[in-house]
Image: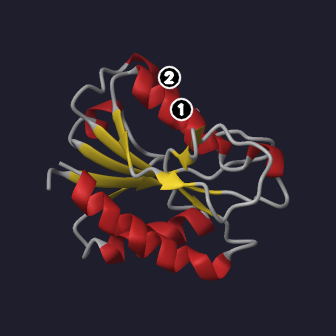
Amino acid sequence: MKRTAILYSFNSQKTARAAKMVQEEFGGNLEEVNVEEITLNKFHDYENFILGVPTWFDGELPNYWDEFIPELEEADLKGKTFALYGAGDQKGYPENFVDAMGILAELLEKRGGKIIGFVPNEGYEFESSKALRGNYFCGLPLDFENQARMVKPSINRWVEQLKREFD
């Protein structure tokens, strides 16, 4: 597998917990990078990415992405492959469940990035999501509030899928 980074905020509890589970399933072969400290030069050191992005408030990206998004909007991401996972609350925020994943995926695709790791929307109850592509999410939705027991098994299945889909 090509050089792969798992990028998330080291200060976000649930997203960081999920990152540790993903890292464990990959056998510790991912380079952990704090999104709060990433630069475009460091970003270009990798070909494959797993991005952890929770949805904040009413369907927003976390503010720690604010510093890096303008750089991504100008970057050429051709040849780079991305898998996304996101924390959301389908009962508390059913109208924008894991929207941040969809917002980020759209940006990456516009800049030439390839998105992998799509997950069927079966088993989730929500009104709408920017992360939907037909009947699939553009990544792995994790609901720690309402489906906590499903988090670990979902991550395990998703990582097996990623191992097949990453170049």
| Circle 1 SS class | loop
Q: How far from the left and from the top, in percent, is residue 82?
A: 35, 43
Give the class, few, some or many, for how many residues have Cα within 10 Å of label 1's Cα (few <14, many ≥20).
Answer: some
Q: Nearer the viewer, residue 65 or 134?
A: 134
Tag shown at residue 27: none
| Circle 2 SS class | helix
* Above or below, 62 relative to 114: below
Q: How far from the left and from the top, in percent, is residue 154?
A: 50, 71
* Above or below, 48 relative to 90: above
What residue is disc 1 on? 67
Q: Which residue corresponds to the image point at 64% horizontal and 40% vertical from the top-left?
A: 61
Q: Going by the image, does 99 lie left or right of 110? A: right
Q: How far from the left and from the top, in percent, is residue 2?
A: 14, 50
Q: Which residue corresponds to the image point at 34% horizontal and 30% vertical from the top-left?
A: 113
Q: Are marks 2 and 1 in contact (CB under 8 Å)?
A: yes
- Name the image quarter holding residue 90: bottom right
Q: Which residue corresponds to the image point at 24% horizontal and 76% vertical from the top-left?
A: 27
Q: Which residue corresponds to the image point at 49% horizontal and 55% vertical from the top-left?
A: 119
Given the current orientation, which residue lies at the most extreme top position?
Answer: 74
Residue 31 in sight: no
Could you give the CA–CA distance between mark 2 and mark 1, rounded to whole angstroms?
A: 7 Å
Give the class, few, some or many, for how many residues have Cα within 10 Å of label 2's Cα (few <14, many ≥20).
Answer: few
Question: Disc 2 marks which amino acid?
Answer: Pro
* Above or below, 103 relative to 75: below
What residue is disc 2 on? 70
* Above or below, 25 relative to 94: below
Q: Going by the image, does 5 lie left or right of 125? A: left
Residue 161 in sight: yes
Quadrant containing the N terminus is bottom left
Question: Disc 1 marks which amino acid?
Answer: Glu
